[in-house]
Image: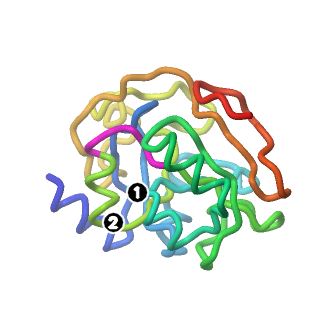
Amino acid sequence: MMESAVAAVLDGLVVGLPTDTVYGVGVDPFDFDAVARLYELKGRPAHKPVGLLVATVDQATEIADLGDVGRALATENWPGALTLVVRPKVVMADWVGDRQRRTLGVRVPDHAVARELIALTGPLAVTSANESGGPETMSDVEARAVFGDRVAVYLEGTAPGGEASTIVDLTSGRPTVIRPGPVKVG
């Protein structure tokens, strides 16, 4: 199943994957058509950017400027429920990150299946596997009931749920908590 998911991502298709919070759907963030497909699938408003999941701190530093503070926070808290808002180093598809602010939310999920997929494909633009505004799904079975065959591959698994990640903005020179969560910063 993992090989099929990797092939689907490389073909620009949407895949389902369990994360440490909810079940998600993801695509290659460098593929403009794939990201558009993700937004269409969810009915997600264009003004609502999607973040990135990465497999490791090193993978994050290849695409984003974590800075010293961000690297320290990432090393201490990843994998886990901490999203860092940073400056991207590379150009990604529209809607990945906030183009107007030139920022990108990035984190390493604390779920082995998600990290295995991302280690094989590279970073993924991931959002919850639900129609925009609808209830979140927690498993491949629930996500399949929502999206059916509009998602190319569903990796089996269940998300344990829990609190949404802490979001910390590192773009203003000092860490600013945008959304409090399970990781305490500052």
Residue found at x 55% / y 71%: 63
Left or right? Give the position of 143 relative to 133.
left
Residue found at x 74% / y 34%: 186
Residue found at x 83% / y 57%: 173
Residue found at x 29% / y 28%: 158
Name the image colouring. Answer: rainbow
Residue 119 at x, y percent in the picture: 30, 61
Q: Which residues are magenta?
A: 108-113
For discs 2 and 1, the disc positioned in front in the rendered view: 1
User: Residue 9 got which mark?
Assistant: 2
**Three-letter amino acid code at the position of disc 1:** Thr
Residue to which mark 1 is pinned:
56
Nearest the viewer among 37 and 184 is: 184
Nearest the viewer among 99 and 45 is: 99
At numbered mark 2, what does the secondary structure look like: helix, strand or loop? helix
Q: Within 10 Å of the Cα at label 1, are there few (<14), some (14-19), or many (20+) other Cα atoms? A: some
- Main SS of residues in magenta: loop
Query: Could you give the CA–CA distance between mark 2 and mark 1, rounded to whole angstroms?
Result: 19 Å
Residue 15 at x, y percent in the picture: 34, 53
Q: Quadrant of residue 171?
A: bottom right
Q: Considering only vertical position in the picture, is 173 above or below 112?
A: below
Nearest the viewer among 84 and 9 is: 84
Left or right? Give the position of 90 relative to 127.
right
Residue 65 at x, y percent in the picture: 64, 68
**Three-letter amino acid code at the position of disc 2:** Val
Residue 62 at x, y percent in the picture: 50, 73
Indicate yes or no whether the magenta region holds residue 56.
Answer: no
Q: Quadrant of residue 24?
A: top left
